């Protein structure tokens, strides 16, 4: 009898040990390798709120091993995260604190439009080259100078509460996209001398200095409702400049940008605009302003001019048509487009002149 009791006890103990082992196995999933203890210094941390029907969080990374503590007791290890998007489904509706071991990563993408994420914290990641972070709340400051000193490309977008971004010591930055942050009123890029592309659209900037950026080629500051001032060096090699939907009442810097090929200043408060001898300019959009005067040079590379929805009268339009001249006719020449509708002089100017000269007239296209 005692023998049977001991066998029963041993059987129960084995079951318990087996269940414990399975539970332990389920808490660590993915690939088998050792990682250091997760700390504030070696992880990206944030909180995800699972509130509705959507319960899936996605993370993308690569260039090194990666481990994700999902906040529900499970740790996922990924030997080669660059091979696929990492998706995880939560079981219960509550908040989870996520920690990503990212010391070895070269690139990482965190953030989601489907699940509310907030309270982003960054450790130290000297190997990180590309970083994308989007749609975070309750994050007022991001210090990439301390966390990602060697980053080359960043995308920081749609942060509801972001007020400050420090990239002053990110000396290798080449491409910056910091946009859609409704509380970001200032941005300092003066130390990022390798910068070639800057998109800071959709913030609340009032001014921006681009001095000391000899490699800058493309700049988009559109949709900054209060932006009315840009500072440039005496000569800069900018190819494209977009300042649409801002608050410019005058523009006095175009003579500093002799290499400009594309320029859009639509939806500002300009009353006059003079384009200097920008030999390379191909695209100009100054529509939806208050222009009574538009002066451009005879530029045979210009292929699209949009000056509709202004206050250009008959004489101003006729003068413009004369300067535009005849479209060049040579093999494989691109078509040239002109829109000047919604101007006071639209129906009383010499409308046949640009048509005769080969321009394609766009009507009511915005």
Image: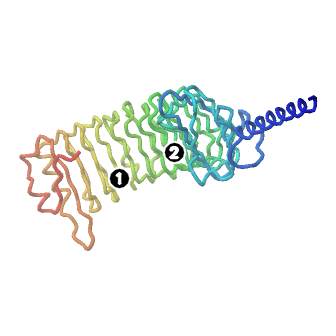
Of tags 2 and 1, the one toward the viewer is 2
Residue at point 26% right, 62% down?
Answer: 300
Q: Residues within 10 Å of mark 1 (few under 14, many from 20)?
A: some
- Seen in the picture, residue 187 relative to 307 is either above or below; the reply is above
Residue at point 84% right, 35% down?
Answer: 11
Image quarter of residue 242: top left
Would residue 146 be seen by someone viewing this image from the given angle?
A: no
From the viewer's perspective, is 236 left or right of 291?
Answer: right
| Visual colour scheme | rainbow
| Percent x, y of residue 235 | 45, 51
> Quick one: quadrant of the C terminus?
top left
Question: Which of the pair 134/5 is nearer the observer?
Answer: 5
Residue at point 82% right, 32% down?
Answer: 12
- Residue at mark 2 to residue at mark 1: CA–CA distance: 19 Å
> Quick one: quadrant of the N terminus?
top right
Would residue 307 be seen by someone viewing this image from the given angle?
A: yes
Q: Looking at this rendering, what residue extends furthest in the bottom direction? A: 331
Image quarter of residue 164: top right
| Percent x, y of residue 87 | 57, 43
**Label 1, on which residue?**
262
Question: Which of the pair 226/258 is nearer the observer?
Answer: 226
Query: Callout 2: helix, strand or loop?
Result: strand
Residue 176: which disc? Answer: 2
| Percent x, y of residue 50 | 53, 29
Question: Sequence order check: which comes first, mark 2 or mark 1?
Answer: 2
Residue at point 57% right, 28% down?
Answer: 92
Question: Which of the pair 311/145 is nearer the observer?
Answer: 145
Query: Callout 1: helix, strand or loop?
Result: strand
| Percent x, y of residue 195 | 53, 49
From the viewer's perspective, is 240 left or right of 292?
Answer: right
């Amino acid at each position: 009898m005692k023998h049977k009791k001991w066998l029963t006890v041993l059987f129960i103990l084995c079951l318990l040990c087996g269940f414990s082992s399975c539970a332990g196995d389920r808490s660590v999933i993915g690939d088998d390798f050792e990682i250091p203890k997760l700390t504030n210094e070696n992880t990206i941390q944030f909180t995800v709120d699972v509130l509705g029907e959507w319960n899936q969080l996605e993370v993308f990374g690569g260039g090194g091993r990666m481990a994700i503590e999902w906040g529900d007791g499970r740790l996922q290890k990924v030997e080669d995260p660059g091979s696929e998007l990492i998706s995880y489904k939560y079981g219960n509706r509550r908040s989870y604190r996520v920690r990503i071991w990212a010391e070895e990563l070269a690139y990482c993408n965190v953030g989601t439009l489907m699940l509310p994420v907030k309270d982003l914290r960054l450790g130290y990641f000297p190997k990180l080259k590309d970083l994308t972070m989007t749609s975070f709340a309750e994050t007022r400051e991001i210090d990439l100078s301390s966390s990602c000193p060697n980053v080359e490309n960043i995308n920081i977008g749609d942060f509801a509460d972001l007020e400050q971004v420090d990239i002053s010591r990110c000396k290798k930055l080449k491409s910056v996209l910091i946009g859609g942050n409704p509380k970001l009123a200032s941005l300092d890029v003066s130390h990022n001398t390798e910068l070639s592309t800057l998109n800071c659209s959709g913030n609340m900037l009032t001014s921006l200095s681009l001095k000391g950026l000899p490699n800058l080629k493309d700049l988009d500051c559109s949709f900054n409702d209060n932006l009315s001032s840009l500072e440039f060096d005496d000569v800069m090699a900018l190819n494209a400049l977009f300042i649409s939907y801002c608050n410019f009442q005058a523009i006095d810097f175009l003579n500093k940008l002799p290499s400009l090929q594309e320029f859009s200043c639509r939806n500002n408060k300009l009353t006059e605009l003079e384009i200097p001898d920008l030999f390379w300019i191909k695209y100009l959009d100054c529509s939806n302003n208050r222009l009574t005067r538009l002066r451009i040079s005879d530029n045979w590379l210009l292929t699209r001019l949009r000056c509709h929805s202004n206050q250009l009268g008959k004489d101003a339009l006729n003068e413009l048509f004369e300067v535009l001249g005849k479209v060049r006719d040579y093999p494989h020449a691109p078509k040239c487009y002109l829109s000047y509708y919604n101007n006071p002089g639209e129906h009383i100017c010499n409308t046949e002149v640009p048509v005769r000269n080969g321009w394609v007239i766009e009507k009511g296209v915005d």
